[in-house]
Each structure stands twice: as structure tokens, then as C-alpha cells.
């Protein structure tokens, strides 16, 4: 037991290894400073974690959340997976999408945007709900 405590202390915490994700974290941090909005910094912190610690959310869960938060953009700092079906028309913003998830969101009449696309479209932070 003592050995594993020592190993845990020695293991260095890593962040994202993809260059695209690293640039996105820097972009979100600069946007947070420029606009003075804490939501962008919160998203940057979530994306700076290793991939295994980021959420992967299925469509059935997004459908339930879309029913509660009508008219809001659901932001996932991870990957959206295609398991389940959609009854609502959600606007989903995520780091990554599976092929099935994009197809099902499109068929349901919703929107699937990456975080970079959402930043370019200048979506209001008031309309964003961060899904954990």
C-alpha cells in the first residue's frame, strides 16, 4: 500500500497532447482575459485536463438535459457519443463528436458545433450551459 502512495506522488500530471486542443486552451484563456468572462476560463481549465479525465456524454443524456434547458447551448468539454436517440432539438457545443452523434443531432434538427466554431460565431456566454 505504501508503494502505491509513493507512485501516485511521482506520476506527473499531463495535459492535452494534441496541438489543436492546446491552441484552443490558449484561445479560451485569452478570450477570458479580453472579455472578462469567467466561463471561458472555466472551459479552458476543463480542456487542460488529460483526455481520460474529460467527460464523454451520450445522446440520451443530452436529450434529457435539452428538455430541461430549452433554448440553451449545451457545452461539453469532451466528446459526444452517439448512443441513444433525440426527441429534442439541442444545440450542442463540444470538443469532439462521434460520426453517429453528428448524424443523429442533424436528423433531430439540432446543431452540433465544435468549441472553435462557437468562439468564431461569438455565442453569448449567457446562453451556454456547461455539462459535466
Image (cartoon, rainbow, N blue to C red):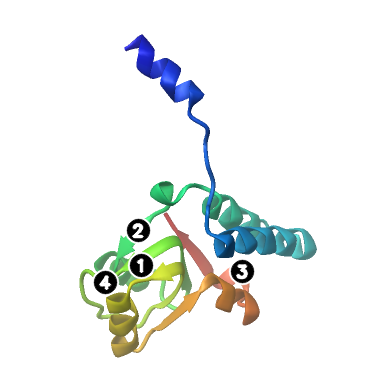
Whether tag 1 and tag 2 are in contact, CB under 8 A, the answer is yes
Q: Which residue is mark 1?
A: 80
Along the polypeptide, which appears first: circle 1 or circle 2? 2
- Label 2, label 3: how far apart the Cα atoms are: 22 Å
Please tell me how crowded label 3 is: few (under 14), some (14-19), or many (20+) other residues with Cα within 10 Å: few
Q: Under tag 2, what secondary structure?
A: strand
Please tell me how crowded label 1 is: few (under 14), some (14-19), or many (20+) other residues with Cα within 10 Å: many
The label number, if any, that marks residue 82 in the structure image: 4
Along the polypeptide, which appears first: circle 2 or circle 3? 2
Whether tag 1 and tag 4 are in contact, CB under 8 A, the answer is yes
- On the image, the x and y values in percent for residue 83 come to 22, 69
Q: Under tag 4, what secondary structure?
A: loop
| Residue located at (51% from left, 47% from top) | 49
Whether 105 is drawn above or below 79: the answer is: below
Whether tag 1 and tag 3 are in contact, CB under 8 A, the answer is no
Q: Which residue is mark 3?
A: 125
- Label 4, label 2: how far apart the Cα atoms are: 10 Å
| Residue located at (72% from left, 64% from top) | 31
- On the image, the x and y values in percent for residue 100 come to 27, 77
The N terminus: image quadrant? top left
Q: Under tag 3, what secondary structure?
A: helix
| Residue located at (48% from left, 78% from top) | 113
Whether tag 4 and tag 2 are in contact, CB under 8 A, the answer is no
- On the image, the x and y values in percent for residue 46 come to 53, 52
Along the polypeptide, which appears first: circle 4 or circle 2? 2
Q: Nearer the viewer, residue 41 or 70?
A: 41
Q: Which residue is mark 2?
A: 56
Whether tag 4 and tag 3 are in contact, CB under 8 A, the answer is no
The C terminus: image quadrant? bottom left
Please tell me how crowded label 4 is: few (under 14), some (14-19), or many (20+) other residues with Cα within 10 Å: many
Seen as rendered, the residue at the extreme right is: 34
Amino acid at each position: 500500500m505504501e508503494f502505491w502512495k509513493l507512485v501516485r506522488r511521482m506520476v506527473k500530471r499531463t495535459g492535452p497532447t494534441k496541438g489543436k486542443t492546446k491552441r484552443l486552451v490558449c484561445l479560451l484563456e485569452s478570450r477570458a482575459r479580453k472579455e472578462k468572462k469567467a466561463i471561458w476560463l472555466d472551459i479552458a481549465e476543463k480542456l487542460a485536463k488529460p483526455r481520460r479525465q474529460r467527460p464523454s456524454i451520450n445522446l440520451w443524456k443530452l436529450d434529457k438535459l435539452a428538455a430541461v434547458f430549452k433554448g440553451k447551448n449545451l457545452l461539453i468539454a469532451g466528446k459526444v457519443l452517439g448512443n441513444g436517440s433525440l426527441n429534442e432539438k439541442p444545440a450542442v457545443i463540444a470538443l469532439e463528436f462521434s460520426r453517429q452523434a453528428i448524424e443523429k443531432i442533424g436528423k433531430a434538427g439540432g446543431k452540433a458545433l465544435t468549441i472553435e466554431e462557437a468562439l468564431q460565431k461569438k455565442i453569448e456566454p449567457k446562453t451556454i450551459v456547461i455539462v459535466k
